[in-house]
């Protein structure tokens, strides 16, 4: 007990926030997963399903740069409570529409867009709240706990949602989500006091916010190493979001696939993230963080997509998920360390807000592209071939074979992206001369 007290000293408020917000994230993730299943069962269209993610990400991409510039001036606790309540009202509207038999796909698109809008302002407030609740000497432990809980959500949400869907139906999933929201809301409202930031300042007028936004963009333009890393992640996010759009279409429609297959693959993804988090937690500092980032991405992009393309059974797909995701936490940790080392503290908030818009704008584009490629290009192409043709022999026949062919091309696109950015001299300068990006 003495060891535990020393290990988690000063983290009482953070642990309450971390555990309850993690539980709420589990409920929200389960609802999102259940609605993906529901929408695909209603339409059978990968594009229609991928639009759910597009609607969630679009407000975040469009408004993140503004939210990052002003979030430090807002009351974090009030912002989090308002945004969480707004998300709960959106979930209640889904429940009401389901109970009355009026739920349509466009309703979910609209609700996801509203949820994305709330998350745009909730996330920066939550990130700063964690920093204010955590002693500096416990930052690494807090970051590890957040990564661990995020991985657990990835593992548990598809498994629990699938069990509830098959036994009690989608209503049980939504009710679970609302219960977890209530627990998180009460914990934040009555048991957590978020201290004020001594550096928090008020801003006057529209001009100051625009100046703050512009300063972050100018800093990135002058520091090409960081900018090239962000562009690398934007390109990887494009490939990954095409993958995310095509995965349900393949696993829910292909011979040997099912809702259970999709849940198992997602669970294996979460287990791989947990394993990767443990690996990086106990690993020494690498001699070259850039090399670790490039190699991790290259391994991930090549293995998973290729195995998904050629595999025909759930165990093989699960192996692909493990290989594709086990080194992603390693990559993320080294990327985060590299960013924090080179971006000065006085511009980190503005630079990170600009980074979010640049790095994540490819995600909705990728979801749209992935859904359209599956429905309009690859599935019709595979359906037009004879069963004894070479693509049919390699990727199979029937619905889902087109998505498998798409994964084959994604493997090539991911490898090519990594090799191109690996040649960037600006990225490698981050290793040789850390001071190069410290000018403002």
Image (cartoon, rainbow, N blue to C red):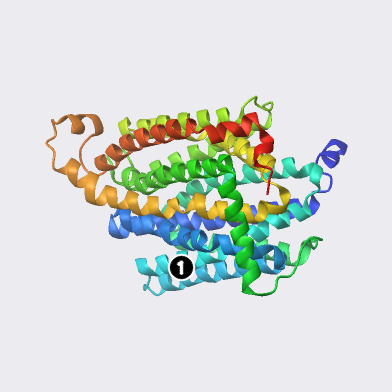
State the residue in front, 409 or 294: 294
Residue at 72% across / 57% down in the picture?
A: 129
Relative to 23, is 200 above or below?
below
Residue 313 place in picture, x, y as percent: 34, 33
Residue 202 place in picture, x, y as percent: 74, 70
State the residue in front, 221 or 95: 221
Residue farthest to the right, as pictured: 2
Relative to 45, is 70 above or below?
below
Badge 1 is on which residue? 111
Relative to 24, is 104 above or below?
below
Tell me if 57 is positioned left or right of 404 in this view. right
State the residue in front, 212 or 409: 212
Which quadrant would the N terminus be assigned to in this image?
top right
Residue at 50% across / 43% down in the picture?
A: 233
Tell me if 210 is positioned left or right of 134 in this view. left
Residue 356 place in picture, x, y as percent: 55, 53
Q: Quadrant of residue 311?
A: top left
Tell me if 231 is positioned left or right of 196 in this view. left
Relative to 91, is 293 above or below?
above
Secondary structure at numbered mark 1: helix
Look at the image and tell me whether residue 312 can be seen: no
Residue at 78% across / 62% down in the picture?
A: 191
């Amino acid at each position: 007990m003495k060891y535990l007290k020393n290990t988690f000293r000063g983290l009482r408020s953070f642990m309450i926030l971390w555990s309850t917000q993690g539980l709420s994230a589990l409920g929200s993730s389960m609802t999102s997963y259940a609605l993906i299943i529901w929408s695909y069962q209603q339409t059978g269209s990968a594009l229609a399903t991928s639009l759910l993610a597009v609607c969630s990400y679009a407000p975040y991409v469009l408004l993140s740069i503004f939210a990052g510039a002003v979030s430090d001036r807002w009351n974090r606790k009030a912002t989090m409570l308002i945004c969480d309540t707004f998300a709960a009202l959106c979930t209640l509207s889904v429940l009401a529409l389901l109970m009355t038999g009026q739920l349509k796909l466009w309703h979910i698109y609209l609700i996801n867009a509203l949820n994305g809008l709330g998350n745009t302002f909730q996330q920066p407030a939550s990130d700063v709240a964690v920093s204010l609740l955590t002693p500096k000497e416990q930052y690494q432990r807090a970051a590890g706990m957040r990564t661990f809980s995020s991985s657990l959500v990835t593992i548990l949400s598809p498994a629990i949602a699938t069990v509830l869907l098959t036994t009690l139906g989608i209503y049980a999933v939504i009710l679970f989500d609302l219960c977890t929201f209530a627990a998180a809301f009460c914990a934040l409202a009555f048991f957590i006091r978020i201290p004020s930031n001594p550096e928090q300042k008020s801003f006057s007028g529209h001009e100051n916010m625009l100046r703050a936004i512009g300063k972050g963009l100018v800093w990135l333009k002058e520091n090409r190493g960081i900018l090239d890393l962000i562009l690398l992640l934007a390109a990887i996010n494009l490939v990954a979001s095409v993958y995310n759009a095509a995965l349900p279409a393949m696993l829910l429609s292909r011979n040997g696939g099912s809702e259970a297959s999709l849940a198992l693959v997602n669970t294996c993804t979460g287990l791989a993230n947990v394993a990767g988090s443990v690996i990086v937690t106990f690993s020494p500092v690498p001699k070259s963080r850039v090399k670790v980032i490039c190699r991790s991405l290259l391994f991930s992009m090549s293995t998973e997509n290729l195995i998904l393309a050629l595999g025909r059974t759930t165990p093989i797909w699960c192996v692909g998920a493990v290989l594709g995701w086990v080194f992603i936490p390693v990559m993320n940790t080294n990327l985060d360390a590299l960013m924090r080392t080179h971006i000065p503290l006085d511009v980190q908030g503005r630079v990170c807000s600009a980074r979010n818009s640049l790095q994540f704008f490819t995600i909705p584009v990728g979801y749209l592209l992935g859904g359209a490629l599956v429905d309009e290009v690859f599935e019709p192409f595979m359906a037009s071939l004879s069963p004894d043709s070479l693509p049919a022999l390699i990727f199979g026949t029937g619905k889902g074979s087109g998505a498998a062919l798409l994964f084959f091309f994604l493997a090539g696109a991911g490898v090519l992206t990594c090799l191109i950015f690996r040649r960037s001299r600006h990225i490698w300068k981050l290793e040789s001369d850390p001071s190069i990006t410290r000018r403002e």
